[in-house]
Image: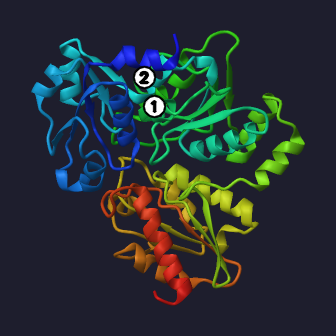
Amino acid sequence: MILAEKIKLGFGGKKILLVGLGLQGGGEGVARFLLQAGAKLTITDLKPKNQFAGILKKFAGKKIKFILGRHRFSDFKLADIIVKNPAVPGKSPFIKYAKRLGKDVLSETQIFFNLVPREKIIGITGTKGKTTTAMILAHLLRARFKIVLVGNIPGHSALESLLSLKKMPDFFVYELSSFNLEGLRVSPRYAIITNIFPDHLNRYKNFAEYKKTKENIFRYQAKGDFLWFGKKNDTPPDIAEKVALFFGISARDIKKRLKSFKPAEGRMEYLGKIKGVHVVNDTTATNPGAAIFSLAQVEKRFKVKPSRVILIAGGEDKKLKYDAFSKKMKRLKKVILLPGRASDKIKFSEALRVSSLKEGVKKAFDFVKKGNVILFSPGAASFNMFKNEFERGKAFKKAVFGVKSGVL
């Protein structure tokens, strides 16, 4: 059966409830996929209608029923299939209610794995570096194969990528968060784990539960499948290069293609040399382990000692521990902390507290000397000040370029 037929058979004419539209574009893509599949679509989200003005405009005239600012048990009862946004926890009383009624509760990832042969999927997860590793690996493999990059990438939906396919690619490189892996009962034939350290403990009861969820990427592998696990100091290029060599990409092609690779926004994104100092935007470091990892990468990349690094960090807590992070601070030139409960947990008396990101950037440039590095790697969530970490990253860049132009 061809892919288009499988999609129509699975969703055509069925009453689908999409739970969680979200603001980063992935939910939009799932909605477009379900519409094209011929589903009778209802979308519900706890966020109020005024937060979705742009999205609602895009779907004007489409046959979608929107229930915004609340969930209703009646919508879950009437639906044939529930499609759950990754941000919606399985512990939600509405999801539990749907399961008690015997409803199919699916995630975007589960649907994708139902439609695409697992041999075609190279799955990548990890606490830090998974998106960059996925992007680099896809870039390297394109030297020899037809590759489609999908997954936990803002503005994109793995399912929507299937709609434009005229022919199945050689491989999908699928970047998978712990949220994507929840409830998954199938693993890709090729699985990569960049690293694992505590994160999202505001969603998982402990590190063991978080780690167990991550392990779904290989839990259901069979004999003849493949798993790569990054070593302690491996960078995304290190991991991607190992896997690319396995798939037959020559060392020469790897070296050539690495030179043309452009990293994703907000992930160890180099903003250039400004006022004699290197500036790095790593807004997607939303836990302390990720920030510690990023510090090590900065030291290695720019060949600087910690005493040359000015770190802007802090924000909202996800029930994480900051002891190791606090200890690391003492080696840095300067630490500037943003408002938030995570910042309150950081035990470093010499840290400078600021009231806004703009103020933090301005203060950072006040302390710099030639050859220093300003690293924005919060080690915390953003939702006390911004919609998400990507909005936070854009605000950081705006402030940095404001300093560069003399506006700030």
Q: Identity of the amino acid at label 1?
A: Leu
The relative height of residue 350 versus residue 119 in the rendered view (above or below) is below
For marks 2 and 1 on the same chain, the one whose residue lies earlier in the sequence: 2
Write the residue at 60% across / 58% down: 268
Residue of label 1? 159
150 horizontally vs 30: left or right:
right
Looking at the rendered structure, the secondary structure element under dot 1 is loop
Crowd rating for badge 1 (residues with CA inside 10 Å; few <14, some 14–19, many 20+) = many
Crowd rating for badge 2 (residues with CA inside 10 Å; few <14, some 14–19, many 20+) = some
Which of 348/40 is in front? Answer: 40
Q: Identity of the amino acid at label 2?
A: Ile
User: Residue 49: x and y, percent?
Assistant: 18, 51
| Count of number-bearing discs | 2
Quarter location, residue 204: top left
CB of mark 2 within 8 Å of CB of mark 1? Answer: yes
56 horizontally vs 138: left or right:
left
Which of 376/64 is in front? Answer: 64
Write the residue at 37% across / 55% down: 388
Residue of label 2? 111
Which of 34/358 is in front? Answer: 34
User: Residue 18: x and y, percent?
Assistant: 27, 32
